[in-house]
Image (cartoon, grey):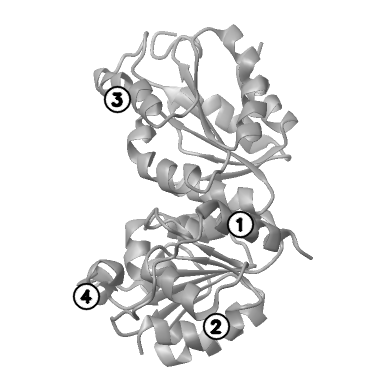
Amino acid sequence: MIRSEILKEIAPILRDQLVVCNIGIPSQELHAIDDQPTNFYMLGTMGLASSIGLGLALSQPKAVIVIDGDGSILTNLGTLPTIANNVADNYILLIVDNGSYGSTGDQPTYAGKKTSLAAVAQACGCENVVECQAEDTGAALQAALDSGQMTIIVSKCESGNAKMPVITMDPVVIRDRFMKAVQAS
Amino acid sequence: MNIDKKITDDLVANDISFVTTVPCKQLAGVIDEIDAREDIFHIPSNKEDEGMGLCAGAWMGGKRPAIIMQNTAIGVTINTLATLIQYYRMPLPMLISYRGELREPVACQVEMAVHTKALLAQMNIPTYHFHHQADVEELDAILKYTFMCNKPVAILTDANFWGGYGDQ
């Protein structure tokens, strides 16, 4: 299973939640599969999806799901201690770990070699860390939502990208409709 | 006047309730003051671009954020300022310890100090420089301006403003 197949499978779960989605092809795939005002697409700034999602989760009560990648987590590895030490039980970090930098030509990441992001997250102090196979991502995500506890999910999947169009929506429009969705009751 | 308290009072008066910090010796007092205030959620970050991500999320969640950091962080955060804070039009007051200015004892700090204002100008970031203690009187207006225009705004605070660094 590749990332876009996971996203298709979990789209019904994501639809009613606030989602912060990683830069590049992940956002393009989510946008093409099921564009929602509750989706915040990152158009730039590699690595910060998990931080944006944490700030959001700490500032309002709705559940926040961050769709991140192994490459982006490695770019901003300092995010994991910050997450661990500032627990927001409405925060779920889903790391789609395909062992590669998908948006730039599938170059291998260290997460696909010797480095275990689940073990790193645990060592950083994250209390609920779940590693699963791609096929089990939906079940793991639903369980995390139902638990009401901050959860880090590392979903191990195959490398590869679906061919999706670039997002042409203006960033201020993405941000504005997202903020209105955050405020909606 | 207690500068640390005055700065924190201005943050609270402007409804800023989410503050991330990367420490500097000059900023130690204001960081302590912020940490002690119940009105402010203080979340230390490991790097300044991470902190700006936290602030972006907090603002979209309905809280007014601020970041406190050294001017060396301008070198770290150019991409984040351009592609996140400015691109999505988000307000972000940046209270910055301006190391490498007059009364600086550490020579290497001057190497980033000489680039600081040029980089901020290149980014079209409104920039204020506090050199004397009385300059802090403008902070309240600067914070109001930041949330009026939805831009990152830099407040550079040098060693003279803080009463000297290493020679006090």
Q: Which residue is mark 2?
A: A11
Using the numbered discs, state the Cα–Cα distance from disc 1 to disc 3 in whole angstroms.
Answer: 32 Å
- Dot 1 crowding, Cα within 10 Å, few <14, some 14–19, many 20+: many
Choose mark 2 or mark 4, whichever is in front.
Answer: 2
Q: Are marks 3 and 2 in contact (CB under 8 Å)?
A: no
Q: Could you say where residue B37 lies in the image, as x and y percent from the top left?
A: 70, 36
Using the numbered discs, state the Cα–Cα distance from disc 1 to disc 4 in whole angstroms.
Answer: 32 Å
Q: Which residue is mark 1?
A: A56
SS category of the residue bearing label 2: helix
Q: Tell me the number on the disc at residue A113.
A: 4
Mark 2 or mark 1: name the one nearer the start of the chain.
2
Q: Which residue is mark 3?
A: B112
Q: Are marks 2 and 1 in contact (CB under 8 Å)?
A: no
Given residues B102 and B153, the one toward you in this image is B153
Q: Amino acid at mark 2?
A: Ala
Q: Could you say where residue B49 lies in the image, as x and y percent from the top left?
A: 42, 45
Q: Could you say where residue A61 lies in the image, as x and y percent from the top left?
A: 71, 62
Q: Amino acid at mark 1?
A: Leu
Choose mark 3 or mark 2, whichever is in front.
Answer: 2
Q: Tell me the number on the disc at residue A9.
A: none
Q: Amino acid at mark 4?
A: Lys
Choose mark 3 or mark 4, whichever is in front.
Answer: 3
Q: Residue at x 37, y 8 (%)?
A: B103
SS category of the residue bearing label 3: helix
- Dot 3 crowding, Cα within 10 Å, few <14, some 14–19, many 20+: some
Using the numbered discs, state the Cα–Cα distance from disc 3 to disc 2 in whole angstroms.
Answer: 46 Å
